[in-house]
Amino acid sequence: MLMATEDNAIVSDGFEANKQCFDCHGQRFYSFENQNTGLIERKAMNPNYVYSQDAYYRGVHKNFACTDCHSPEYETWPHQAELRLEPMYTCLDCHGGDPTYEHLHFELLEEEFLKSVHAERIGDAFTCWKCHDPHSYKRMTTGEFRISEIVSYHNSTCMNCHSNNDHYQLFSDDIKPGLEKIHHFLPNFKLHFSAVRCIECHTSSADTLWVNHNILPKENAVKNCIECHSTSTILMASLYKYQNIEGRKERGFLNAVILNEAYVIGANRNEYLNLISIILFGLTLAGIIIHTIFRLMK
Amino acid sequence: MAEKLYLYPLWLRVWHGINALLIIALIVTGISLQYSNTQFMIIPFDLSVSYHNISGIIVSVNYLLFFIANFISGNIRFYRISLKGLFQQLIRQSMYYLSGMFKGESSPYPVTADRKFNPLQKVAYIVVMYVFMPLVIISGIALLFPETIVPRVFGFSGIHLTALLHSAVGFGISLFLIIHVYISTTGKPISRNFKSIMTGWH
């Protein structure tokens, strides 16, 4: 049975079953009756275990009941302490080898991820869930989102640790320097961060995935401006790939596809304006040359 | 030879010199940015961005000083134009450039103490100094602070439209510069106008 929430987001059978979990884990505070004292107590939920019900039912896993992935033992409360040690599924546990998800290339994603600096430095402890929260994960590369929405969503994945020391220090004792300081070489830091995904510069762009998972060490990140700011911009192979493929079919010329979405100096060149400017420049020069000849002949 | 006229006061010559150098820097760096290429760059992209921004800011301040000084000094009077008979004046001056000057005719609107510019110059300078320059400065400042630009205009990126305006007007100024320098060579001798803008005396 499908049912609708107040704002008409379609949710599934799991809605009723999950209600009990979200009663506590969907909010910052929860109340319960203390069996020993008989008092109603109000406690703060550990913020790491608070999940937005709205985000869950908008995510790709909305059709699942919590206990499809978590132990059914969680249905009793207080939860048993050892439940925290239950092994968690990874993406490949469900999606690996499944023809339904073949087009998403999960095996290739894992292959690329295993080459990444995350896998190399942190090893098996760095699971899919360190970046992608299965409780709210959305596929952004479906064509229904604007580029700015894709950039914002994907960058928030990185920022969750790289601009948050509390999360970053789950992996390292270091204190992260501010992102603006690290990226001091970027003119207009804010614009770059709101218009371009971190992964455009921090992954290898040679693969054929929608989203590359081979996050490179910082020494190998793109720092050369013209890799984006030229007609052969790497953005066409990554950020604008989705629109690019469709756009080329429809409009047929380079970079027209990003005309409506963004402006990248050096990458956006209007061919008609280019032609007009060359003609005007040529006419000016020709006029001057002819005029000079007449002056010399005088 | 006619009596020498002191047409270009020091402030104007200093402004003109700074403007000339920086406009050239802006054109070169602007072309470098617009036509950046992985195989060949006139100037590296990051340096072009810095030079273009710095030159643009100085040109803008310089323009503001020119704008104010032009009023205070009274130099603005040379830009005053009357629409009455303007078209005929423009035709007459154009005919001189296209034909009369080859026949040895004298300029229909020679430089005097009260008339520094001929009608064609007046129109060109008014368009460049009071239309193109404000447009390129305002769009340039907007691009320096892109968060101030309206995100979407009729379905297009506001930044893209601003950039198109900025580069189109910049291109117009580039064409003006080429013609301006060429027309300056029509003095007798060729170096006359160049010396005038250096010394102030015409």
Image (tube, rainbow, N blue to C red):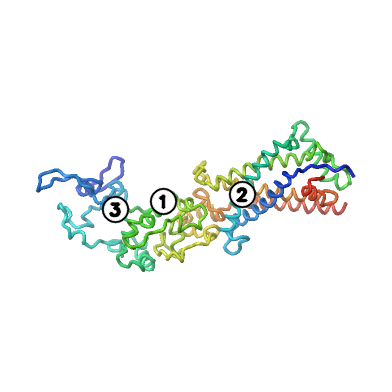
Whether residue A141 is visible to the viewer of this picture, yes or no, is no
Front tag of 3 and 2: 2
Q: Could you give the CA–CA distance between mark 3 and mark 2, rounded to whole angstroms?
A: 49 Å
Report the amino acid beneath label 3: His
Residues beneath discs 3 and 2 located on the same chain: no
Residue A1 is situated, as x and y percent measured from the top left of the image, at: 23, 46
Looking at the image, do the residues carrying marks 3 and 1 touch, with CB atoms under 8 Å apart? no
Q: Which chain hosts label 1?
A: A
Residue at the (31%, 40%) spot, across then down: A7
Q: Name the residue under label 3.
A: A135
Label number found at residue A202: none
Residue B7 is situated, as x and y percent measured from the top left of the image, at: 79, 42
- Left or right of residue A285, residue A253 in this image: left
| Count of picture labels | 3
Residue at the (40%, 54%) spot, across then down: A155
Q: Could you give the CA–CA distance between mark 3 and mark 1, rounded to whole angstroms?
A: 18 Å
Residue A297 is situated, as x and y percent measured from the top left of the image, at: 87, 53
**Within-10-Å neighbours for mark 3: few <14, some 14–19, many 20+:** many
- Left or right of residue B151, residue A9 in this image: left
Residues beneath discs 3 and 1 located on the same chain: yes
Q: Earlier in the sequence, mark 3 or mark 1?
A: 3
Q: Name the residue under label 1.
A: A152
